[in-house]
Amino acid sequence: MADVGGGFGIGVGVGVGARARIGAGNGAGTGAGARATVGVGVGVGVRPYAELTFDSEGDVDRATQGAVSRMEATDLLVFAHGWNSDRSTATRLYDRFFAPFEGLVGSGVRLGYVGVVWPAMRFSDEPIPDFDAPGVLAPPGSGSALDPLTRRALGEFWPERRTELDRVAELLEERPDSAAAFIEFGALVRELAGVDTVPALVAPAVPAIFTDDVLEVCRALTVALARAGEPGAAAAAGPGPGPGDGPGLTVGAGLRGLWGGAKELLRQATYYKMKKRAGVVGERGLGPVLAQLAAARPALRFHLIGHSFGARVVSFSLRAVPDRSRYVKSVTLLQGAFSHYAFADRLPHDKGSGGALRGLQHRVDGPVVACHSPHDSALKVFYPLASRMAGDSAGLLGFDERWGAIGHDGVQAVPGAPRLSLETALREGVPAAGCVSVDAGSVVRRGGAPSGAHSDICHEELARVVVAAGRMGR
């Protein structure tokens, strides 16, 4: 889901050679004002807590903006979720992630907690470790059919596409052994993703996953499911294709064995829409709102945190930060779903181009920390596959490093950007400015197929990274 030159990213690393370090911080307590209740957040234990709610166009709910503006705090933690099916899921995530902070910051820090809520969704077979109650999720490997929770979430995500979604659900349930059925399914997914409406002049910007032969794509995704550990996917896919295989490749279990890959294609269509939506919400919504808050309260310090596509939300919000502003004190990206080359001045495979939002770390008065994990199947396997753009379908099954995600292997192609283990970051702190990668695989390691550890982020160790990046510890 990445576009290296024109999509995911938060800018080119500047000052990354600086080696000044900030202690990780293990102080106790916050100021007395931190317990004042502001805003809403049923089930969120920290105070003051409020939510900033945005629609798909980036328009903010003014009541939620007002609640944030009234917070009594020295520092605001602003956290944007990734794919979540509804507000209650996001709120529970914020409750879990924010819980350790009060005991980690210094006595002069009064924290305010802000949860960004924007329209996204999550398939119900994507587990969050120690988060979802038993029986709530569809069991991994349960087949290609859509469970009721996912079907409802899709209807809320695409409210004007009930007819198309009904037919998609029917095909996934019936799994016809028919090439014509796959062609119909591919056309429906393209309509849902909105790629059929892309003008011809910009058609090359449409990912090949939506334009290539649908049988080849579904076969590739079925093989990817096997690689990610989805039970039964390997048998369904049959032996992997050889170098000479093309759209006419044979399938061990017949065409019925490809409907798991077809379901993954539908999932990728939701990611494609969320990717675009996250950029809009960040640039047109969150960024201007934070700028207004900072203008009204110049002493307030902001610490931006984003998970998955929420990392894209907070990253694109930097476009609305005025030059020479100093109110954004840190950015922490947790399993970020955007290009690992986003910070590069020049792309290794295209020396004439740079990262999508290069240079914007100048607007952060502190470090940009990218936490990554090799146990994240969503970013290790599906992200690079779905990120391939039109023009190289022969390599669809390849995992070319140019399509890698920052949440899989950190910041790439930025000279001098340090790479730290989580243990080192917690022991010695992180650089005072610029880009830094932190391998969080020692804690971000649990989760089932197909996403792996993508959502395994509720750990005190990651809260301590945020405190270190924001210079909030003792």
Image (spheres, rainbow, N blue to C red):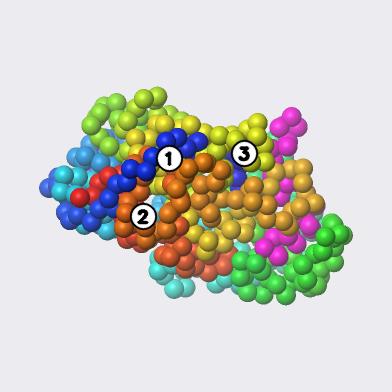
Q: Can residue 410 be found in the magenta stretch?
A: no
Rounded to the nearest angstrom, the CA distance separating label 3 from label 1 is 19 Å
Q: Is residue 33 visible to the viewer in this orientation of the structure?
A: yes
**Which residue is painted at 32% across and 46% down in the image?**
21
Which element type, helix, strand or loop, lies under badge 3? loop
Which element type, helix, strand or loop, lies under badge 2? helix
For the stretch drawn in magenta, what is the main secondary structure?
helix
Write down the quadrant of residue 65 in the picture. Answer: top left
The first of marks 3 and 1 along the sequence is: 1
Q: Can residue 221 be found in the magenta stretch?
A: yes
| Residue that carries the numbered disc 1 in the rendered image | 17
Q: Give the total number of marks visible in the rendering.
A: 3
On screen, residue 12 versus residue 470, left or right, reads right
Q: Which amino acid type is shown beneath numbered disc 3?
A: Leu
| Residue that carries the numbered disc 2 in the rendered image | 425
Q: Residue furthest left?
A: 32
Work out whether 216 lies above or below 16.
below
Work out whether 22 lies above or below 460.
above
Q: Residues within 10 Å of mark 3 (few under 14, many from 20)?
A: many
Mark closer to the observer (1, 2): 1
Q: Which amino acid type is shown beneath numbered disc 2?
A: Ala
| Residue that carries the numbered disc 3 in the rendered image | 347
Q: Which residues are magenta?
A: 199-224
